[in-house]
Image (cartoon, rainbow, N blue to C red):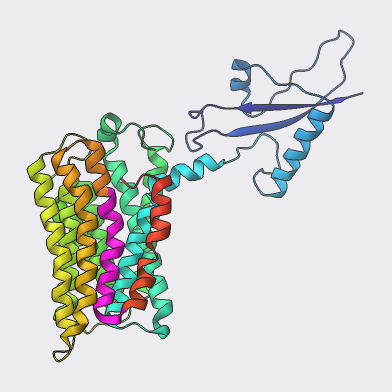
Amino acid sequence: MPGIVVQASRLPAQSRWPHHNGHTEIVRVVAQSATHARGRHRPSVGVGEPYDRQMPRARTSGPAASAAIIRHKASRRAGALAALPGCIVPTMSTVQTWLQLIRVGNVFTAVADILAGALFIGAGRLDAGRVAAASLASALLYSAGIVLNDVFDFRKDSTERPERPLPSRAISLRAAILAGAVMLFAGWSVTIFLSREAAIAGTALALSIVLYDGVLKTTPLAPLVMGTCRGLNLSLGMLAVGVRWEVAHYLAVGLLALYVTSVTFFARREATVASSHRLAIGWLGVGLAVAGLVAVAVRVAPAQDLGTLWPTIVACLALEAALGIPAWRAVRRPEPPHVQAAVKTFILAIILFDAILVLTSRGPLPALAGAALLIPAAWLGRAFRPT
């Protein structure tokens, strides 16, 4: 009687299909005809045959074959396999590689900017839809910027950080370029439907991202452009729900831009031995930006009730202390592990910076809601490197 042969091959990360990376499992069910008179079997040919010839084939029968067939059918029902045998199945490692490429934990810092900007300017429940749309646009634009950053840094990372998804060939350069372009266009498109002012901010943000990644990243202007991107992101949150700005709003945007400019300056040599003087200057800029939040609180607080400043002052002092510990270690020993640890803390602290900004105008409960974004950001930051 004809038998059933199940052939399972596990291909290496680099196959002939460059758009499928990571380990890809090919499951092929081949119906083998009965042996003919001379006792020879007809060879089975399917997708991936050249690799099968380089590897010993796993032929099973009986219960093992039945179990493999069941797994094959279950995969088809889940949509992991196409109707024809021998198709490619994306694995969890592929998804994890893409999440690493976009630094998924850091995406929450971009969303925190939108939430802070909207709440700071006075967003209410009726603005929830606009805030959600602006958050989606910000997440897409941020992810696009990170992906395109690695695209332009491909040669440099091949030497300094070969473990990253692109230098390690876990994701093809072509796929990364396409994904970055699609996310950039999608994020910009969402801003068009918010308001004219938000569309202007979204356009400026998208252009700044491309300008930073493709042209200015290796120049002395790079930290300033990166800070401008964050300032525009905060502006996007404000402009999504309101257009009337006061001095406090401009000050808030400028302080966040100063904070991120200083962090970028601090992180410029994080992959090599950095200069202690450079690190100290970056740390000083971060400290000034955090302290400036007290000035925002002064502008927002009623003149007759300056006692409301105390929560902001206490929060700023706590944040300064939390940032000072890893920064001091990096300044004392400017080696990559210490510098990268400080940069990671600085990036996650953007969420707390935004929360304090909300505290200055909306009180503790909305501020705590914004600070809650630190939980998924920190949790994902442990699984996926933020730098």
The percent position of residue 361, horizontal first and vertical second, equals 25, 81
> Quick one: which residue is furthest to the left in this view?
277
> Magenta segment, which residues?
344-363
Q: Is residue 220 visible?
A: no
Quadrant in which residue 171 is drawn: top left
132 lies left or right of 89: left
Quadrant in which residue 309 is drawn: bottom left
The percent position of residue 299, horizontal first and vertical second, equals 14, 82
Quarter of the image containing the C terminus?
Answer: top left
> Quick one: which residue is furthest to the top in this view?
38
Which residue is found at the position 32% from the left and 77% from the top?
Answer: 364
Which residue is found at the position 38% from the left and 68% from the top?
Answer: 135
240 lies left or right of 53: left
Q: Is residue 168 above or below residue 341?
A: above
Report the predominant secondary structure element of the magenta stretch. helix
Quarter of the image containing the N terminus?
Answer: top right
